[in-house]
Amino acid sequence: MWAKITKARGHKYLQIIHSYRDAQGVPRQKVLWNAGRIDNYNRKDLEKIGMKLLELSGSQCVDFNNLEGEAVVNWGYAIYKRLWEEFELEKIMNKIISKTKVQFSLNDSVFHMVIQHLLEPCSKLKTYEKQQDYLGIKEVELNSLYRSLDLLAENKEKIEEDIYFKNRNLFNMEIDVAYYDVTTFYFESVKQDSIKEFGYSKDCKFNQVQVVMGLFVDCEGRPIGYELFRGNIFDGKTLEKSLKILKERFKIRRVIIVADRGINSKNNLLKLKTLGYGYIVASRLKSMSKEIINEALEEKGYTEVSDEGFKYKVINYNNIINGEEHSERLIITYSEKRAKKDRADRNRLLQKTAKLLKYPSKIEASNKRGGKKYIKLTGNKKWELDRKAIETSERFDGYYAIQTSEMKVSPKEILQKHHGLWKIEESFRIMKSNLEVRPIFHWTEKRIRGHFVLCFLAFLLERELEFRLKNKGINASPNKIRDSLNSMKIVKLNHKGEQLYLKIPGDPLSNKILSAMKMASPKNVSK
């Protein structure tokens, strides 16, 4: 294609010519466009010529005078859509809906709620109203969102099992460790029912009803399964039912359960042994026998691990449960850093103790928690500082005990596995803050249970993305990941009735996420 100037009647004309060969190979020329007299061109004529040349070249032509903005929409959710597909969640949702007479798409409804929960948590009504915020997402009815929660609640266990068994390669199926912990989720209510109940709140919301969750995660922090309990159940009493997740539903026969001291009771440890599971649990050193305590605090026998004042000692002993002896090991650790923290914590309590001793009525009005633990009642019924309690506390500064059934696993590996407890603690923190399980905008038991299934699915996708980024050497917090995906925007434009899309550059992390997921970015401008 080329430009040709011709003369006629004393004037010059511009033509756009296309050269080609015909079927016989003979060179030919074809006039594509007559651009008019050159001497008559004004600015608009030149613009018209430029637009026509772009059009003839196959490039996209845009007249800015006819360009109208319509909306700014998110396309970063496509990252989670890829994971949704890899976990075969659409198949799982379609399988559920195929057994019902429901007409709407369960997959579209649940996917949209999960995406909204991951990128900007809000109520289901707000989720419905924000559908236009995502490029190309399929619209659903508001009632479909609520109805989907019922179906999720009814199929909770089936969803967990299908995810686990269909994606064995995504999980570490040579699984040797499962982390378990319990937390609470409170409601802005005092109304009790079959699941909401008053209890010990880990959010310090003692005047509101709550539910209790027991959660298992794998060694990478991805959720395996969970159980909900009434709000007044004690941590230690959740374990038996939760273990059925591993034994009966996931067919995991041999695993080491790692947990905090909340589940460390003789009854729970016996159940773990009976089911064939091992355990690594935090232990209450102060509750051990005098002989064990003396041996633990004895300087001899410790192995130095670092120059930072960390060391450990192994004590073999027999734990008597229901009259039977069970071989166990105590891994006693000492840390200078922990000792400083213990001293600082006690000094803060002693400051409160000093204030309480000035107002004895406050001591009698409550239990002996906090600063009250260092106060005692004398024979003449006066409160005074309990120096013996302070000395006892000082004796254990810096010490920590881990109790385990694993006799062949090295102490360093035991410590490493126990250190992984931060993963489940972080899991609960993410669920409560980043994913905002609370506030819960539902009041019936089925809708509450459905809401938690939704949170489970969202948490699974978030953790998997975080894990894949980590494997690529990209350490990004859930907050940074969410901000990055929300930065991936497209401006929807209308040009003479035709839809155009202008990509807004995302933040630096967005390109790394796309690279890690092996996904291409949209063109800067596209139809």
Image (spheres, rainbow, N blue to C red):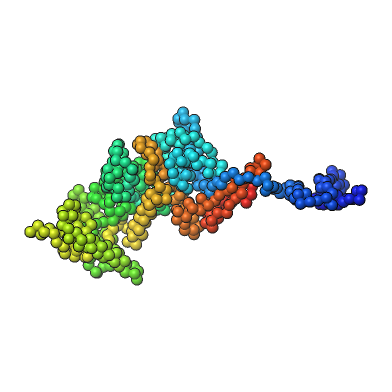
Q: Is residue 166 visible?
A: no
Residue 265 appears in the figure:
yes
Question: In the image, 201: left or right of 55?
Answer: left
Q: Is residue 74 left or right of residue 214?
A: right
Position of residue 73 measured from the top left corner of the image (x, y, whole percent) = 55, 46
For residue 132, above or below residue 382: above
Residue extending furthest toward the bottom: 307
| Residue drawn at point x = 46 percent, y = 41 percent | 126
Please state if 37 lies on the left or on the right of 315 as rendered.
Answer: right
Q: Position of residue 416 (x, y in %)?
A: 36, 59
The residue drawn where x is 24% and y is 53% is: 326
Quarter assignment of residue 441: top left
Furthest residue in direction left, as rendered: 380
Quadrant housing the C terminus: top right
Residue drawn 74% across the image and 48% down it? 51
* Number of dots carrying numbers: 0
Percent x, y of residue 305: 34, 67
**Residue 234: x %, y % from top left:** 26, 46
